[in-house]
Image (cartoon, helix red, strand yellow):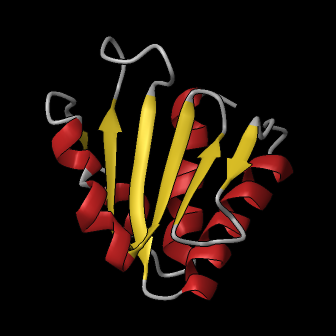
Amino acid sequence: MTNRQLLETSVKAADDKRAEDIVVLNMQGISLISDYFIICHGNSDKQVQAIAREMKEKALENGNMVKRMEGFDEARWILLDLGDVVAHIFHKDERSYYNLERLWGDAPIENMESVLTQ
């Protein structure tokens, strides 16, 4: 699975669990950590956990390795490291506080409309 396919699968998984305001930052040439950051949020602890669980399961189903998942029990900010794709799944209240989109403001935003309309 290519990095782009992993990204699209992860975005679709988040959308399937009704993640809100899904933003993908293209980190290529900006960060050595990963090629893409997915940033989204849920409105409750259970929804945040469901989003993370679905993204993890879809990655594993497609033969990708999940390097790390942190913050699952607290469900305020779950970091899901899939290698070249890192997902930041926030509780709605936490997302605006950390404002990763502003922190990584020099990263171009990927248009994922084609994935979200399938």
Nearest the camera: 109 or 94?
A: 94
**Quadrant of the image for the C terminus?**
bottom left
Depicted 35 relative to depicted 105: above or below: above
Nearest the camera: 2 or 106?
A: 106
Q: Is residue 114 left or right of residue 75?
A: left
The residue drawn where x is 66% and y is 38% is 82
Nearest the camera: 51 or 4?
A: 51
Depicted 17 relative to depicted 89: above or below: below
Q: Is residue 89 left or right of residue 102?
A: right
Nearest the camera: 82 or 68?
A: 68
The image shows residue 39 at horizontal and vertical percentages of 39, 54
The residue drawn where x is 79% and y is 60% is 57
The residue drawn where x is 16% and y is 44% is 102
**Quadrant of the image for the N terminus?**
top right
The image shows residue 14 at horizontal and vertical percentages of 53, 67
User: Residue 85 falls in which quadrant of the image?
Assistant: top right
User: Residue 66 falls in which quadrant of the image?
Assistant: top right
User: How many marks on residues?
Assistant: 0
Depicted 27 relative to depicted 12: above or below: above
Q: Is residue 13 left or right of residue 39?
A: right
User: Residue 28 falls in which quadrant of the image?
Assistant: top left
The image shows residue 46 at horizontal and vertical percentages of 63, 86
Q: Is residue 83 left or right of residue 8?
A: right
